[in-house]
Amino acid sequence: MNRIEVALVVYRGALRLLPAHFREQYDADLTTVVRGLLVEAAARGNARLLLSLLREILDVSVTALRVRFAGAPPAVTSGQNREHMMGFGLSLLQSARTLARQPSFTTAALLTLGIGIGCAAAAFGVWDTLLVQPLPHRAADQLVMVWRDLPRMELPRAPLSAPTLADVREQTRSAFVGMEAYTGGAPAILHDGATPERVNGSSVTGGLFRLLGNRPRFGRAIEPRDDVPGAERVVVLSHALWLRYFAGDPAVLDRMIEVREQPHRIVGVMGPEFVFPSSRAELWVPMRIEGPQRQARDLNFLTTIGRLRAGVTPAQAQAQLDLVFQRLAADYPESYEDASLRLEPRHEFVVGDARRIVRLGMGAAALLLLIACANLGNLMLVRGFSRSRELAVRTVLGATRLRVAGELLSEATLIGALGSVFGIAFAFAFTRLIVLLAPAALPRRAELGIDARVIGFAALVGLLSALVCSLGPALLAAKPARAGLATAGGSLSQGSHAVQAGFTIAQVSLAVVLLVVAGLLTSTLTRLLDVPVGFAGDRVLTAHLALPDTRYSSHDATAGFYARLFDRLRALPGVESVGGTYALPFSDDYASSNFIPAGRTDLEPVLVASMYVTGDYFAATGMRLTRGRDFDARDRTNGESVGIVNQTLARRFWPGQDPIGRRMVDPNDADDVLTIIAVVNDVRRRELAREVEPEVYLPHAQTTWGGGGMYVTVRTAGEPLKLAGALRAEVRALDPLLPVSRVARMDELVSRSVGPQRFRAALIAAISAAALLLTLLGIYSVQSVFVATRRRDLAVRLALGARPTRVIAEVVSNGLRLTILGIVFGAALGVVAARSVNTMLFGLPPLDPSTWLTTIGLFLTAATLACWLPAARVGRIDPMTTLRSE
Amino acid sequence: MTPDGPLPLTPLSLAILMALADGELHGYGIMKAIQQQSDGHLRAGAGSLYAALDRMERTGWIAEKSGIDAAGETQRRFAITRAGRSVARAEAVRLAAVLRQARQQKLLPEGS
């Protein structure tokens, strides 16, 4: 987005002030005209652009008042019509003029308030959408997840098997209206002319759509008749997929697409609001539970969702689940040991993990709003000071205090209203930024936006903040007015000084809290990224291929394909080595199974992650064999089963011994024996913050599996992504129907894995930066007033021979006193705040000295500058001129 | 509407009518024309302009024509109506009278 577009987003926010009928009719035209004006202004510099934008927003605000209060724009008809306007409206217009005459004050006040409100409103909107609004299903508060809870394996959300679901559904009918299930992994392959694309889907039981209560946009949803054996294969598309792939063609019904290598007929398209189970799923097919899957009680693969009967509480439903599960466990003890059934509201399941980041954002936004309010208060005080002579003159000439107060009130209202407009515009921009920057894991992203509730919130907060912050100081400034004209040119009352100091201290301390938290989160991110991952991903190109079973039914066919592909890839210029794996670090889940060292039946089995690798996988990814040999031609299907273990597993199973030649076995399957031929260095696989888990790598040549997915890893001499096109071309040359997906540089996978931490750090850092800016502005303005009010004293001292540097130093120290007091308070509050984000930190304690010292040091430096700039003006005071003018 | 009912016109309304006297314009064009006519002295914000256009259209002084601009976006174009022309003329006549009066009172040199 260029700066014009950003400005237009802000302007469009302001357009919301206009009455709906007017806006609907003209908003496109207004935007076009303003775009023209902005383009013109932008050619003359950014300051011009900003000025034009502000002018147009002010104009829209005034127009909105006119259109609303008068029902017609008085600009067209003659002057006397203004008399008919309501008194307050007139007073507002008067205030608008006053504010327009003081553009620098008005701009500062509105920007301050706008940033504060915008941030708070965006945070409110995210909180409201994610945590308060029901999910986009019918009576969504009745939807619950039903999990198998396996505390011993730390799996609180394990799926159910088909017989379990059938039994539980049958026996809990008094508590649940229905119970349905879904699974991920219904990939479809779409052909758009030349390039095949892989799309994620979800398979669902026939009653799921009915249970959720979502209707299709057109056509029909999946129905109970679709999941019976032998039914026709049908598919329902998401709105996004329909638009993207079928260009929104309504004639898409009855067309055939290939899902899981089978042709499916398109029967419906869902609306844009339907996101289920996550935004990754772009189509839905009926689940076909056939043959052994239907009977296997231990084959757990169904994610289960139920709808509570009206009036049944989750606790009652949970009690019934417990009862049913006890019966099942008695009938099939071996299938249900160490487990229980656990009910969880669907809403909690979807948004629960996001709660912390939302709270963090809300807290930071609230602090920023307070800082903005303190700043506004300060600005009003300063302005009151500069207007005190005018007010004094008017009071002496007979204007009542009430009249003056009324004017101040109307100004505060206007500032609040305009500040809210700015705030709404900023909220738009902030929300868009959040949607753009948020990690894919943030749920309900598609629903985020500015709605009536957010606008109402912004308006309310804007008016309240403006009234509270501006009225008090304004009245305070007006107070000494009656005291006399003689002194009115000069000083603020003692009370005003105290209030200003209070504002500054409060601002500084809140800003310090935010900065410290931002510092901690940023350090966390750098420390995470400093964790050695165990591979060198910056020159590795990775891509995922999924060979369809229909065309690659045997292991030989699969292995043959990869051998040919790898040969072609190796022949490409700039390719150093090529390998492949079933499970890349920081990618999909991987298989795990239990192992013990051979002959040690006395030991508890250890869950070991196992992945098949092929080609020169270790060389391609930059992993190192610390002992032993790589897989080679000796490792065939008919040979001895071999494996390469990571250092963690080697230490765990054979501490202090050489693992080469030793064996490990699956305690449940004595035939599953692996001979260790090498040890490879540890690699982070899931999260950077997690300990490395025991792993074993197996040669692809010894698997009997047919297809399945494979990540290709290509080590390149130069930038890996430059080879992406060549990789696609080689795949296409071998199999034009095979999609190449998830093309990435391997280190991007690591970087993506810290998405949540990065988002957190960026969010708080951005808010803190705004807080810092506002606080510095506050300090600067306090210092300016300090210098201005003491101009005479300072001039006298200079005339008596005081050195300017000494006087400047005194003024600076006045500001720094307030700042340091604020820092002390802020540090105390910061300790509490830092402790509360403790769980988000990695590799450093909440009171990490270096982070704290750096943050406070930076703040102090910036604050000193803000104290010094106004003080430097003392040096330019000419004592004689100043004193004569008094 | 009596001929002098809406008079005097506000500067903005008169400027809009005069801008449209030469032919249809869209909002941006009107804005530029107003600036040009007044040597940059009169300047309306987009909001005020459209509020005025809305009002004048409802009074029947101007009419709206939608069209497609060079960039392919639909944008309203406005044209002056017969009523608009006559009200502008009436205002011009009124202003001319004001000028005459000013000259008689030696507020304005002859011929300027």
Image (cartoon, coloured by chain):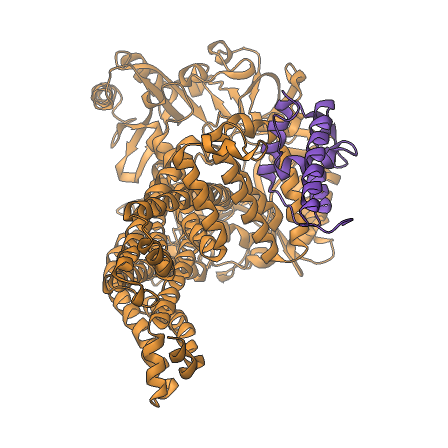
Chain colours: A orange, B purple
Image coordinates of residue A81 in percent, x first then y, are 51, 31
Query: Considering depth in this image, is B25 or A653 the residue closer to the camera?
Result: B25
Q: Is residue A483 left or right of residue A379?
A: left
Can residue A739 be seen at all in this image of the molecule? yes
Image coordinates of residue A104 in percent, x first then y, are 48, 57
Q: Is residue B51 left or right of residue A884?
A: right
Query: Considering depth in this image, is A716 or A591 the residue closer to the camera?
Result: A716
**Vertical comparison of A557 with A343: above or below:** below
**Vertical comparison of A858 with A665: above or below:** below
Image coordinates of residue A752 in percent, x first then y, are 50, 49
**Vertical comparison of A796 with A86: above or below:** below
Image coordinates of residue B78 in percent, x first then y, are 71, 29
Query: Considering depth in this image, is A174 or A268 the residue closer to the camera?
Result: A268
Q: Quadrant of the C terminus of chain A?
A: bottom left
Can residue A753 be seen at all in this image of the molecule? no
Residue at position x 67%, y 16% in the image = A251
Quadrant of residue A467 in the image?
top left
Q: Residue furthest bottom?
A: A801
Quadrant of residue A56 in the image?
top right
**Vertical comparison of A780 with A93: above or below:** below
Q: Is residue A232 left or right of residue A413?
A: right
Query: Considering depth in this image, is A383 or A299 the residue closer to the camera?
Result: A383
Residue at position x 41%, y 32% in the image = A86
The number of callouts visible is 0
